[in-house]
Image (tube, rainbow, N blue to C red):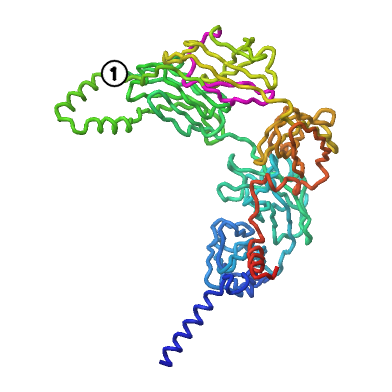
Amino acid sequence: MPFSRGLIAVFGAILAGCASVGSPGGGLYDETPPVLKNSDPANGATNVRRQRITMRFDENIKLDNANDKLTVSPPQEKSPVIMSNAKTLTIELGDTLKPNTTYSLDLGNAVQDNNEGNPMEHLSLLFSTGDHIDSLQICGYLLNAANLEPVTGAYVGIYRVAEGDTSALSANDSIFMTRPFERAGKTDEFGKFTILGCAPGRYRMYALNDGNTNYRYDLASEDIGFVDTLVVPSMDTARVVLFSFNEGKLTRYLDDCRRSDSIHINVRFATRMDSLPKLSFMLPDSSLVPCDSLLVPEVNQTFDTLTYWIKDSACYAADTLNLVLTYLHTDTLGIDVPRTDTIQLLKPVQRAAQASDKKQNDGKKPKDRKRRSRKEDEKPDSLPKINFMTLRQISGTTLDIGDKPRFETSAPIDSLHQEMLHLMFQRDSVWEEMAFRLELDSLNPRRFTLIAHPHYTPEFSYQFVADSAAMCDIYGNPLNRTQLSFKEKSTEDYAHLLFNIEGISGPAFVQLLDGRDAVKQTSPVVGNQAKFVHVPAGTYYARIVLDANGNGLFDTGNLAGRRHPETVYYLNAELQLRANWTVQQTWNPTEVPVVKQKPDAVKINKPKEQKEKKSKNEEYLRKLGKL
């Protein structure tokens, strides 16, 4: 009996200890991150020869995405191996250590305590294979040039410039494309980076979103950045700001080509194309038939996503089509050259129809099923019968002032009779006809816009009426009589916004943004002012682009020409616009440091909440009545 009571007491003590970890019933949450007790080699050690680094902490740890967060400088060709066990972290470097070189290991916040996940911030280690440590550093931020978004997980690296080197920062400077970084740091969730272990001197500096982890710029898809001056490392925390951009080099290739159903061919390219491809059908005797009269293209603005409507009955009835596709393809030298592919397109199996036929055949005699199947085989494969083409309004029934009503048909339009189309407006409860013209979409053969003469009037009600057979699609299906209604909003539904711009000169334009950083309206800066009229009520943000070439677009940079992207600033404020309000906003884009300009509300890379554990303790203390 005494033994049993003792055993129960031991188990009770164990259970009580387990329950106390992270439990409101057991006390406050642990908010303390791990503490580094010692390391081998020690921080600042010299004459190091071993490639294994060991760190020991005051409590059990776990790793959070350590392979991505660890930055070794000089960069390693072989990825280090990282392991943790209880209170110990081990890093095995893959490359042989260079002589007389300072090495830095930066783990960021990858090390956390095992219970609550409290991260140890800015964990780093310096050691040297020589007899001294280079202890200078370079700190800064990397922002996306187009939208000032903090760039996460990119490298910022340096190359030392020898005395008397006149090629540095010139158009002939190719070191960034031919050699890996000599030293590098990686950006965190705020876009911040630190390059540790720098020796005194002057350095070229570049940023790289490294697509193949070779620490040099050699892929067109990689985003880059550079600074125009040589950078000098120091002991302080002076910040360098770089702006990341993509040069816009296009790697063109065919990404997909398929027959989605009997009447559609879908073609997708990897990036923007300058023109439509050339298409032909290959006959059994290998002769080619141009597709110009057999297909109707429907494409997007950048010509990289295309849908071809098969209008010829012999083509859409065929089970197999051999399509010959000629387009521009980027070769291994980065040059666009014509390429021709022959692609076999099979008509997709109509599984739903087969299942329906099987259900209908269930219970029938085998002889009846054979007779029915034979009759179906005798039927020609044709487009499913469509009695009427359909017409829908894609611009909505309530238009913003200045918008035009847009419509879309179910299949490409083959013919239309405008005298059978009518645009009506309501005046004193009476519907009257008004003049208009119909503007066909040049890229989408199913869409058109109604342009009214002289214009649409706010608060007026309108009807678009199409008589029977006013339109016909490419399959011979007519439009049934259709009537669609819409109206334009009142001027009192909108706000008006005027920016008075200070501190900049030259061409510029302002973009009004929503909460997702999407452009809603754009206005040029004229006479140091940008005007926005008829802005729907809501919450907005703004950015200004210094439009160096005056083309009304944001233009990217070019490394060989040492040309930076056009400069972008954000208004570090939220704009609340109410209906029937007029708001004036004075804005000097250079007053706030650029790294602090973009409002957190429109940032895509929002840092993780740092005070989660504190809020848990506050909640716990509040429940106890101690707060």
For the point 71% across and 51% down, which residue is it?
Answer: 141
Q: Exactly how many numbered labels are in the figure?
A: 1
Q: Quadrant of residue 49?
A: bottom right
Can I make out residue 362 in this image? yes
Q: Is residue 480 above or below residue 354?
A: above
For the point 80% across and 46% down, which residue is it?
Answer: 592
**Label 1, residues with CA under 10 Å away: few <14, some 14-19, many ≥20:** few
Along the line of sight, the residue nearer the viewer: 171 or 496: 496
Q: Position of residue 523 (x, y in %)?
A: 75, 29
Q: Is residue 179 above or below residue 406?
A: below
User: Which residue type does callout 1 highlight?
Assistant: Pro
Along the line of sight, the residue nearer the viewer: 116 or 212: 116
Tell me where the magenta segment starts and ends, as one range. 392-418
For the point 44% across and 30% down, which residue is it?
Answer: 257
Q: Which residue is mark 1?
A: 380
Along the line of sight, the residue nearer the viewer: 223 or 12: 12
Q: Secondary structure at mark 1?
A: loop
Q: Quadrant of residue 433?
A: top right
Q: Quadrant of residue 434?
A: top right
Q: Position of residue 90 (x, y in %)?
A: 55, 68
Q: Position of residue 362 (x, y in %)?
A: 21, 33
For the point 33% across and 30% down, which residue is it?
Answer: 350
Q: Position of residue 441 (x, y in %)?
A: 57, 19
